Image: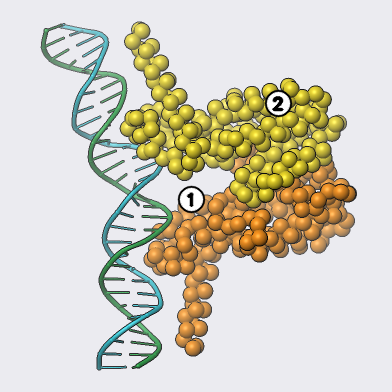
Chain colours: A yellow, B orange, C green, D cyan
Amino acid sequence: MSVQERKQRERADRERLIVATARELAEQQGWDAVTTRRLAERIEYSQPVLYSHFRGKREIIGAVALQGATEMAVAMRAATAAADGPRARVAALARAYLDFAERNPAVYDALFQLDGGLAYAQEDTPEPLKDAFAALLECLGEVAGDGVDQALFTETFWAALHGLATLTRAGRLPREDAEWRVELLVDRLAIV
Amino acid sequence: MSVQERKQRERADRERLIVATARELAEQQGWDAVTTRRLAERIEYSQPVLYSHFRGKREIIGAVALQGATEMAVAMRAATAAADGPRARVAALARAYLDFAERNPAVYDALFQLDGGLAYAQEDTPEPLKDAFAALLECLGEVAGDGVDQALFTETFWAALHGLATLTRAGRLPREDAEWRVELLVDRLAIV
DNA sequence: CTCCCTTGTCTAGCGGTGCTAGCATCGAAT
DNA sequence: ATTCGATGCTAGCACCGCTAGACAAGGGAG
């Protein structure tokens, strides 16, 4: 039995290595540079090994996305926990969100820009994704305002953050006044 | 002289044909299906002809984007012109924006999601892009609120719309409550 | 201890991609 | 009529995601 266990462990290790390497490569040179050939070379195995762990490149992107969702939820909860009062909490949340997107562009892309084959906003949505949304909801729910559905409010606020994150990163919005835009968003959307 | 003129005209026609065909193909089957081979076959020329008009696929995407920007500006101005009062104008603008994104997903992608090699938010930004932003600004400027920079407000509002458009289209947001989210956005962001 | 068979990995290759070098053809100008 | 430049073609490069099939290593049965 112990032999099988060891093999299973080694296999799990290798899977983690694949995901970590894909993520690293994507952050360094963008997802376009993450080809199965390059990835295989970096983990020092041949291409087909990747396909014994994942159905294809898309599933590898999905794995990075799930990892990122977990980290993002942690980052957002840490930021809101350190802030006093609803207004400050929302501002901290927004900054944490945009900061994460800025610091981990490849992970953010895997989550919200690329097709990782994951289900969103459904019953079979993976737990990490649901939890990341829950982290948003916990903070934003308390500023939705009376008679406003908290989930819908959260979705709308999230969409606004997502728009800022992507347009800024793609050079569609000048980077300089980013902080100002966040302030405006929080001031107007959140009801103290 | 007339011979050269005729040739120039035919060349311009062919360039328009390339852009129109690329757009059509992208709307029908997505940008992934727009390969230089397929595109060449549809216009009934060989691949290298494409490269005598455009540097590469990216520039073709850029051409579709510019065309789309012009149309989008027209659509937004038409929508706002038909509405009475600032509040109604902003709501009409938002709906027109999202409607355009929904009806022309490939063009929207070319504009805001893909790399068409265009400069955004700079001096050398192509005129159609500047004009599309101007169309947003014309309407949104009047609801920015006192002491708030109109351009920055417009950028923020635009980002929110962009977030809604992309997340909805990617299945990250359920489609059902789209209208409700627009209402919330307009009510909260616009200052009557 | 030897044989077999499973398990795991690799090499090689398929059909596709964006893009380009170099040849052939055609038409205008001499 | 002949030259010559413009123009579009065929063929091919290096790369992509993915997979079939050969091959070696290792544990279990006799």
Residue B76 horizontal side relative to residue D6, left or right:
right
CA gap between label 1 and label 2 equals: 39 Å
On the question of residue A62 being in view, the answer is yes
* Chain to which the residue tagged by mark 2 belongs: A
* Chain to which the residue tagged by mark 1 belongs: B
Residue shown at the point (47%, 44%) measured from the top left:
A32
Quarter of the view holding residue B169: top right
Residue shown at the point (87%, 58%) measured from the top left:
B84
Estimate the x, y position of residue A105 in percent, counting from the top left.
Answer: 57, 38
The residue identified by callout 2 is: A79
Quarter of the view holding residue C6: top left
| Amino acid type of the residue tagged 1 in the rendering | Asp
Residue shown at the point (71%, 53%) measured from the top left:
B97
The residue identified by callout 1 is: B32
Choose mark 1 or mark 2, whichever is in front: 2
| Amino acid type of the residue tagged 2 in the rendering | Ala
| Secondary structure category for the residue under label 1 | helix
Residue shown at the point (70%, 26%) measured from the top left:
A79
Q: Residues within 10 Å of mark 2 (few under 14, many from 20)?
A: many
Estimate the x, y position of residue C28 in percent, counting from the top left.
Answer: 40, 88
Q: Residue furthest front?
A: A176
Q: Is B42 located above or below residue A103 in the figure? A: below
Question: Are discs 1 and 2 less than 8 Å apart at CB?
Answer: no
Foreground of the two, A98 or A143: A98
Q: Residues within 10 Å of mark 1 (few under 14, many from 20)?
A: few
